[in-house]
Image (tube, rainbow, N blue to C red):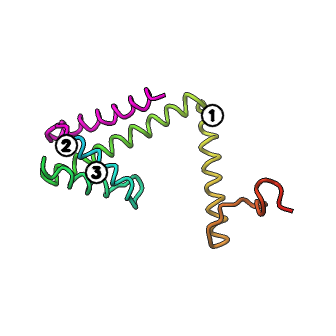
Amino acid sequence: MLVPQTLSYAAKVGVIIVFLAAYSIPVTFSSVVHVIGSSSAANVTSVTPGAVGVTQAANSVALRDFTDSSTATAYSLSQQLVTSATNVLYALVLVLLIFGWTGGKALVGNSYGGAKEKAHRKKKTGGDSDASPGDEGDSKGGGQ
């Protein structure tokens, strides 16, 4: 059970090391731990999707003893961009392998259609309407 988690964490640390080296930022235990900590803190406190901006600011502060702020920001932004693009590509490949082109297209189409319907209901009611029509009352079927 711990093997996949350990491999995943090792890959995450490996990505940090590769990008630090690519930007000529000293790769030390301290610099790597600073990036891990600042990225984790940024993800917890983020108010933007993907913690964009927050991560760059946190990493810039975390790496202030290792490089200048513009290099730290460029490092952080490129790492986040490449990692996000890789994740999207990986997800696309998995959807195609698991569901096939037709099944994947139907899955995405159904999800998109459901999201549009939910947005329409929310706009129509003027509030937060997560419930589907007819979902009033007890969800376990008791209620009366």
- Towards the viewer: 100 or 135: 135
Residue 62 at what x, y percent from top left? Answer: 21, 51
Q: Can residue 124 be found in the magenta stretch?
A: no
* Magenta range: 1-29
For residue 102, side relative to residue 35 (left or right): right
Magenta segment, prevailing SS (helix, strand or loop): helix
For residue 64, side relative to residue 81 (left or right): left
Residue at x 67% of width, y 65% of height: 121
Mark 2 vs mark 1: which is more N-terminal?
2
Query: Quarter of the image holding residue 106?
Result: top right
- Towards the viewer: 125 or 109: 125
Mark on residue 126?
A: none
**SS category of the residue bearing label 3:** helix
Q: Is residue 129 above or below residue 80?
A: below
Image quarter of the C terminus: bottom right
Residue 138 at what x, y percent from top left? Answer: 77, 59
For residue 100, side relative to residue 54 (left or right): right
Q: Which residue is mark 1?
A: 102
Query: Quarter of the image holding residue 2?
Result: top left
Q: Can residue 23 be found in the magenta stretch?
A: yes
Residue 126 at what x, y percent from top left? Answer: 63, 73
Q: Which residue is mark 2?
A: 31
Mark 1 vs mark 3: which is more N-terminal?
3
